[in-house]
């Protein structure tokens, strides 16, 4: 007994902690599984019903954006293309040979790609120093500068085109340069519009980039330039390439800038589609050009999606942030380049504002008072102020529609399915939802008139026609701002809420909604600003009695006369101010980091 006693005593304390402590700590699920298995036999049907209900709910939720995209984007575009390529004898693919057998059409495609590539290169050259200064350094007023840099991106293209035309016109401040009607002005306007894309895309990645590899390279004797080229640039590679792809896409589908600054001398696929549909009414040629543009846009979107996934993977590996640094001697080149860009960007907008204050009798607010009139010789059917109200109303409805549809899509795309096939389907849906961002707005607008002209989709007389078209344009931007936030959320929070018995709707309102609240507010404001300045589709759909402000601006500048030009400049200034205020709200509500993810950057 004396021998057995000391042997049994240590066995007692060893076995006791092994029961309550070690077993649950081994895999926690194993004892829980063994204990709950008998109860699971009773609750299994309810659990299965709950799981099936969640799957059905996700499918129904995904159906909302897919049906909206199918009815109000795919259907009108396919209808327009079919109208142009389908004859009495069937599908006529010979239209491609007829259209591209003309040297002018081939040159048009080449020019579209060339000018977009050059614009993207210039944006990278000027934007990367700005990204370093605004996201890697630290100084007072940095948040304000970030907001101001983004303002040009949300300005209506007709406003930007008018501002640059005023600056470089023969009687303008820089008229002596001889750039009026030149390609240089078109490229400058494209850089003005898309500079923020590069700054915020590359800057958002640079802000969270791990600085230890660069410090190791410098400790081994590498100079600043060599460290930047061999360490920093490769780490920023996915973000740089993604930003370049998106700028290329925006410039290839630029409409307002090319329409106002390019005129008849420089035409892209976008302006030629507009010309073929409105001036010549050659739907066959317009359909071929639309298909060509869709193929080009789809290729760029697929490439951008691949680059975005690589960027997200890279960020997950190098998320250790070294912290921003104070302005020093090494930031001087970036400071000089960014200051020069700021002055260059300020010039066209400042000239537009000053010219809006010039009247035939001198300086004053006469052009702004003229906004309450019908224009010179009663050019308009309604006052310009009514057009502003129409724009605000349509933009508010479009933003609400874009947010509702976009959030439904984001909730589905944010899931991490274990099945690879389902994951690929979600990736394909994510890419397809970006198509409205690059497909010709002219094609969408004209397709609305052709497709939505009979019951049950006869919307030609509906006040919702313009907001629906604008919502389709803003939808990809909403998705790109909200989706990264939901994907970054810890899925264990949702699982914990579900384990505690919360139904799917309660999980969404208690977990997902608070996490994406700031991004959602920013996305709504951004969708409002983009819809406010949308011109391509709206130019087809806005009725003469209810025009929007961008349509009125183009109509005013198309008619000669100092009074009409002055009124157009005043209207453009008001529209630019409204968009700028909304952009400040984006940075205030969504935060710089969320807004930097626009367009999948």
Image (cartoon, rainbow, N blue to C red):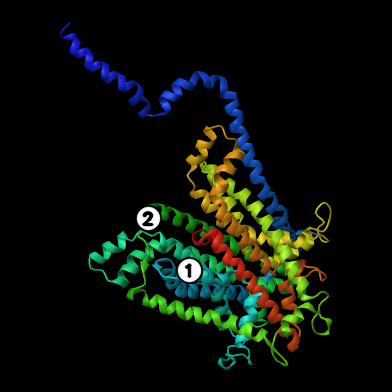
Note whether 206 is above or below 71 in the view shown.
Answer: below
Disc 1 + disc 2, Cβ < 8 Å: no
The residue drawn where x is 56% and y is 57% is 480
- Label 1: few (<14), some or many (≥20) within 10 Å? many
Residue lying farthest to the left in this orientation: 2
Residue occupied by mark 1: 199
Q: Is residue 174 left or right of residue 200?
A: right
The image position of residue 449, as x and y in percent, is 78, 63
The residue drawn where x is 15% and y is 8% is 2
Residue occupied by mark 2: 318
Q: Quadrant of residue 587?
A: bottom right
Q: Is residue 149 left or right of residue 324?
A: right
Q: Which mark is residue 335?
A: none
Measured Cα–Cα span from mark 1 to mark 2: 20 Å
The residue drawn where x is 40% and y is 59% is 208
Residue 156 in view (yes/no): no
The image position of residue 482, as x and y in percent, is 56, 54
Point out the tag, 1 or 2, that comes first from the N-terminus: 1
Note whether 184 is above or below 538 in the view shown.
Answer: below
């Amino acid at each position: 007994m004396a021998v057995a006693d000391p042997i049994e005593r240590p066995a007692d304390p060893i076995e006791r902690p092994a029961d309550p402590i070690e077993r649950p700590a081994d895999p926690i699920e194993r004892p829980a599984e063994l204990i709950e298995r008998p109860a699971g036999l009773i609750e299994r049907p309810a659990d299965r019903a709950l799981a099936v209900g969640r799957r059905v709910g996700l499918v129904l939720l995904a159906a909302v954006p897919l049906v909206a995209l199918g009815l109000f984007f795919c259907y009108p575009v396919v209808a327009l293309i079919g109208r142009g390529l389908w004859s009495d004898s069937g599908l006529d693919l010979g239209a491609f040979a007829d259209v591209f057998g003309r040297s002018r059409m081939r040159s048009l495609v080449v020019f579209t790609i060339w000018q977009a590539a050059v614009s993207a290169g210039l944006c990278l050259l000027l934007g990367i120093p700005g990204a370093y200064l605004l996201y890697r350094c630290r100084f007072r007023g940095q948040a304000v500068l970030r907001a101001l840099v983004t303002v040009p991106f949300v300005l209506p293209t007709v406003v930007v085109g008018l501002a640059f035309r005023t600056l470089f016109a023969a009687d303008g401040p820089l008229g002596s340069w001889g750039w009026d009607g030149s390609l240089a002005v078109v490229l400058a306007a494209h850089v003005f519009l898309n500079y923020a894309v590069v700054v915020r895309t590359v800057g958002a990645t640079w802000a969270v980039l791990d600085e230890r590899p660069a410090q190791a390279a410098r400790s081994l004797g590498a100079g600043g330039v060599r460290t930047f080229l061999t360490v920093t640039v490769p780490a920023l590679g996915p973000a740089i390439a993604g930003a370049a792809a998106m700028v290329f896409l925006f410039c290839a589908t630029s409409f307002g800038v090319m329409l106002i600054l390019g005129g008849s001398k420089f035409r892209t696929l976008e302006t030629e589609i507009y010309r073929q549909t409105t001036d010549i009414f050659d739907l066959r040629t317009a359909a071929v050009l639309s298909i060509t543009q869709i193929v080009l846009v789809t290729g760029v979107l697929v490439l951008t999606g691949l680059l975005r996934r690589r960027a997200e993977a890279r960020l997950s590996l190098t998320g250790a942030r070294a912290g921003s640094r104070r302005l020093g001697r090494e930031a001087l080149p970036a400071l000089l380049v960014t200051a020069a860009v700021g002055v260059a960007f300020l010039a066209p907008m400042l000239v537009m504002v000053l010219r809006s204050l010039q009247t035939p009798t001198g300086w004053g607010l006469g052009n702004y008072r003229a906004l309450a009139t019908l224009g010179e010789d009663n050019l308009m059917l309604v006052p310009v102020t009514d057009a502003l109200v129409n724009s605000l109303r349509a933009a508010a409805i479009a933003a609400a529609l874009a947010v509702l549809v976009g959030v439904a899509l984001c909730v589905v795309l944010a899931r991490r399915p274990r099945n690879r096939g389902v994951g690929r389907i979600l990736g394909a849906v994510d890419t397809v939802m970006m198509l409205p961002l690059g497909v010709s707005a002219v094609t969408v607008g004209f397709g609305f008139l052709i497709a939505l002209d009979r019951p049950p989709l006869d919307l030609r007389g509906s006040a919702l026609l313009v907001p629906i078209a604008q919502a389709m344009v803003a939808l990809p931007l909403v998705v790109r701002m909200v989706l990264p936030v939901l994907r970054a959320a810890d899925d264990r929070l949702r699982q914990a809420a579900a384990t505690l018995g919360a139904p799917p709707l309660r999980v969404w309102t208690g977990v997902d909604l608070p996490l994406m609240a700031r991004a959602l507010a920013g996305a709504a404001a951004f969708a409002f600003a983009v819809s406010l300045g949308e011109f391509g589709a709206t130019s087809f759909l806005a009725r003469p009695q209810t025009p929007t402000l961008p349509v009125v601006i183009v109509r005013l500048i198309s008619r000669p006369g100092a009074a009409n030009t002055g009124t157009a400049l005043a209207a453009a200034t008001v529209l630019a101010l409204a968009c700028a205020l909304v952009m400040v709200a984006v940075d205030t509500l969504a935060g710089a980091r969320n807004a930097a993810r626009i367009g999948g950057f």
